[in-house]
Image: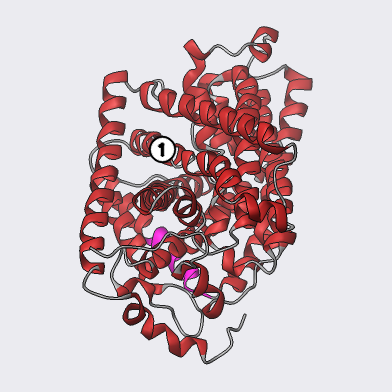
Amino acid sequence: MTTLDTRPDTKLAAELVPEKVLPRVLNTFGLTAAYVFIICWISGSSVMATGGWSSIPMWVAGIVVFLIPAGLAVAELGNLWPAQGGVYVWAYRTLNEPLAFMGGFLSWIPVILNGASGPSVVLAFTLFALHAHVGLTVSIILQLLILWLAAGLALRKLVATQRIMKVALVVYGAVAVAVLLVGIAHATRHGSGTPLRTHELTSLNFGTYGWIFGLVLLYLVGVETPFNMGAEFLSVRRSATRMIFYGSVALSLIYVLATVGTMLALPTEKIDPITGVVSALKFGIPGTAEIAALGIALILVVALTTYQSAYSRLVFVSGLERHLPRLFTHLNPRTRNPVTAILVQTCISSTLIVVLFSQASLTNVFLYINGALSVVWLFSGFFFFVPVVIARRKYKERYETEDFWRIPGGMPVVLLVALIGSVGTAAGIYYSFTLPFGPGISKSSWMTWVGLIVAGTLIAAALVYFFGRRSASKLNQTDSLAHLAVLETTAPTA
């Protein structure tokens, strides 16, 4: 078994290689757009609206106990280690190599689960716009086509994807504002579609609405993901904190405005958990709902593309660190994208689409996958809430001698941030696993399906780690990276 050097002054391959072979193209606006697309799925506002006005205090609670602490923690860690790999590097530097792999794996697996569920959302909005219905077989085929379209776009240069993200972000915000305005207009003329009860806006009833809290955290996770591309930031220290601040504000506004607008326009029982947010626009200018649905479908394809690009970097890093075969470090010489990683991610998600969506209804499978996604992804949060505390002690000299952004207030504030974030994360995991995200699903069925998907994820992590380390013992790091040397002879281009 190869022993990895974890001395503080020893550079990882993930910290050395990417900055030499990958172009720095991500500016503040592009990063903010990527941040929003990685985290925000506007269909989340549809699901939240089905919970009535109690969803609003849950949105606020999620932002306070998870989004803000997570943003503070990853901003500090991202500035301390501005390298490719994000969570993996942070956990490696503060914990140990096995835990670093687990943190990276849990942070990576969302791209697989999102790749399996995301195309169904795109398809639902497209069918809504076209007033069409398709059978199960056609649905699966169309979902596969959507997924591979996103993968194909992700194979382009990152700077090209960045341009699309900037435009789509503006459209996203416009749709959320339009939903709110239509909702207000409808409520002014006919009263609120979902009756407004004051006590629901001031109560945090976790016993009844804990499932809403689980959903809120699901739709807020992913704060750390842009740092998977740390070596591709134009300037981490200039852009990281701005990305998190502007992105979090935009994210919160899009979600809350769309949720409120949907409830003002529609009664709870008539809100579709996927397309409800555009159904509200039927009360506006004729044809607006259909146009918005097509727009959101296209935006979500961009979101899937962003996922494929951002998460492929974790697979690339796993190859560099010899958790995966050398094949996974292959970069396209022209686009500098990790081609093998993107193709493998897409193939695994394609398999899940075929297997899972052939077993149950589109809506139920969508919810099952999202329940498992919430549990797994939230668990990865401990790999930045714990490291931010350890980093302060273990790298005290760097904090004293280097100038980079850190959580203000010293260790007491850092401990408070980590505590609040960890408690919020644990609560989100509990409610996501124990309470169904949909009213038509029994608790036993929910826990069975979510448990099976999560268990499968953990088994996969153990197998990848075992066989990856075994394979790594047969190849030294110099040999494993030799094929990348040719890329260093030519300066990376945007």
Q: Quickly name the residue at label 1.
A: 370
Count of numbered circles in the view = 1
- Residue drawn at point x = 59 percent, y = 88 percent: 491
- 153 drawn magenta: yes
- Residue drawn at point x = 26 percent, y = 38 percent: 455
Residues packed near mark 1 inside 10 Å, few (<14), some (14 to 19) or many (20 plus): many
- Residue drawn at point x = 65 percent, y = 49 percent: 76
Seen in the picture, residue 266 relative to 88 is either above or below; the reply is: above
- Can the viewer see residue 291? no
- Left or right of 251? Residue 308 is left
Magenta residues: mostly which secondary structure?
helix
- Can the viewer see residue 78? yes
What amino acid type should be assigned to the residue bearing mark 1? Asn
Q: Is mark 1 on a helix, strand or loop?
A: helix
Displayed quadrant of residue 268: top right
For the N terminus, the quadrant is bottom left
Q: In the rendering, at what x and y percent does residue 238 appear?
A: 75, 60
Q: In the rendering, at what x and y percent does residue 456 appear?
A: 24, 43
In front here: 421 or 389?
389
Displayed quadrant of residue 430: top left
In front here: 313 or 1?
1
Q: In the rendering, at what x and y percent does residue 284 appear?
A: 71, 36
- 159 drawn magenta: no
For the C terminus, the quadrant is bottom right
In front here: 204 or 352?
204
Q: In the rendering, at what x and y percent does residue 113 appear?
A: 38, 47
Which region of the structure is painted magenta?
Answer: 145-156
